[in-house]
Amino acid sequence: MGGRDGSHPGRASRLAGWLPVVVVLAVLAAGVVAWRLDPAGPDPTDEPEAVPPPPGLAIDAPAEPGPVAAPASGVPDAALVRRALAPALRDADLGPHVLATVAGLDGTLLYSRGTGEAIPASTLKLLTAAAALETLGPDHTFATTVVAAGPRRVVLVGGGDPLLSAPDLRRLARDTATALAATGVGGKVRLGYDVSLFTGPEVSPHWPETYVPEAVVSPITPLWVDEGRPASGTGRVADPAATAAATFATALGKAGVAVAGAPRETTAPAGAAELARLDSDPLSEIVEHTLETSDNEAAEVLARQVGLAVDGDPSFAGGARAVRTVLDGLGVPMQGAATYDGSGLSRDDRLDPDTLTAVLELAASPDQGDLRAVLTGLPVAGFSGSLVVRFPDGDDAGRGLVRAKTGTLSGVSGLAGIVTDREGRPMVFALLADRIDLVDTLGARAALDAATSALAGCRCG
């Protein structure tokens, strides 16, 4: 017992331990009672008044931080731009035909070399992107749909979504199966696919005949999966639309709707009831992808979408013509321009570098917010897209400061984009060389990198 008493407090000790708590509760209760007897008095539930800090401890509110450096002002000096750029463009690897234009964002001409036009290669995609954004708007989407075409017949309708993927088709198949079940359709259906949105040849007559067989580019159609690439990701399939329809048929089967026979090309009946729909990403995001990765197939689809919207001609010729019409309407100088596609794969395309810089100036204008994706989609030197392996030297002045669309064909190299000089003054530029010896291909590319780096490293104010 003694041990037990020594290890546990007695009743008196326990009461002594609770005494302070009881006193505190009594005081609080008295305060509440006093308040209720005198409602005009202070509410004990009110927040306490702020107590000023003792003298000498008051802290002032933080001041607005000043700029790290004074902003650069004015347009770069043309003489300094020439001094920085001209020596780099004399590199023998660039060949005998080099055209160049550098301008301020306000259009002030800072440097020009050569006259006339050159093969633009993929820098032409800047025109296609700007025309698509201007015509359709950055929030525009392209719909791939499935419609009912009669008893137990459905049609997959291509809407010209350039980035339609296999997971997209699986999602569309599940939605289609759900819609069919809701209408009481079970068992098998017959599947057709509609590619009537685009017209004309699927392969440009202005491309070398080897482009499609050598998997440089897919036939251009409003319906495909992964831009006509097989599941392996290497090469191109022979018939992108038929392959997409077969992929969709397989996905329908996994969703519980069997497809009888092979899908057949057809045209959906006018006014057919829509069963399911899949909208693309916004056009602004498609444009950014197209420019960053220099996506030839996506650019060709966008050109045809412009042709369809402008004058109802979604062909190679109609798309190229519509792009020129839209840019001409925006005030872009198109004199001497000859374009036959939307990607720049054609060696028959010709552009003046002034045309390219004018498009970039337009995209940078505060009044042309719809075109901003033309700039945000440009690859960053040494970091993204088609420039990720360019400007390899970590100390290169252009690394991270040059944003440009590349243009490359055999014997052709170009860069067109925007750069800030060492003091933060922005410039747009277009550099085109189209008579490069094949053995000088890499040297010419390095020379253009060096030229734009010279602009980035210039104190041109």
Image (cartoon, rainbow, N blue to C red):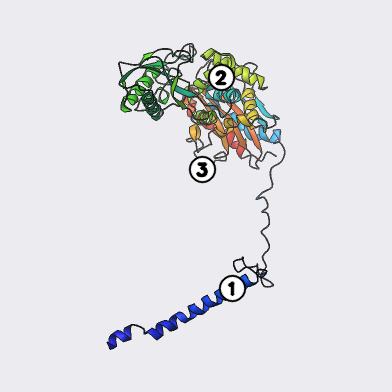
Furthest residue in direction right, as rendered:
74
Up the image or down, 232 lies above or below 68; here it is above
User: Residue at 46% across / 25% down in the picture?
Assistant: 439
Residue pointed to by mark 2: 306
Asked if disc 3 and disc 1 are in contact, CB closer than 8 Å, the reply is no
Q: Nearer the viewer, residue 120 or 240?
A: 240
Up the image or down, 394 lies above or below 178; here it is below
Locate residue 407, reporting x and y percent: 52, 26
- Per the image, label 3 sits on a secondary structure element best described as loop
Q: Quadrant of the N terminus?
A: bottom left
Closer to the camera: disc 2 or disc 3?
A: 2
Closer to the chain start, of discs 1 and 2, is 1
Residue pointed to by mark 3: 394
Q: Identity of the amino acid at label 1?
A: Val
Q: Quadrant of residue 16?
A: bottom left
Residue pointed to by mark 1: 33
Q: CA distance from mark 1 to mark 2?
A: 80 Å
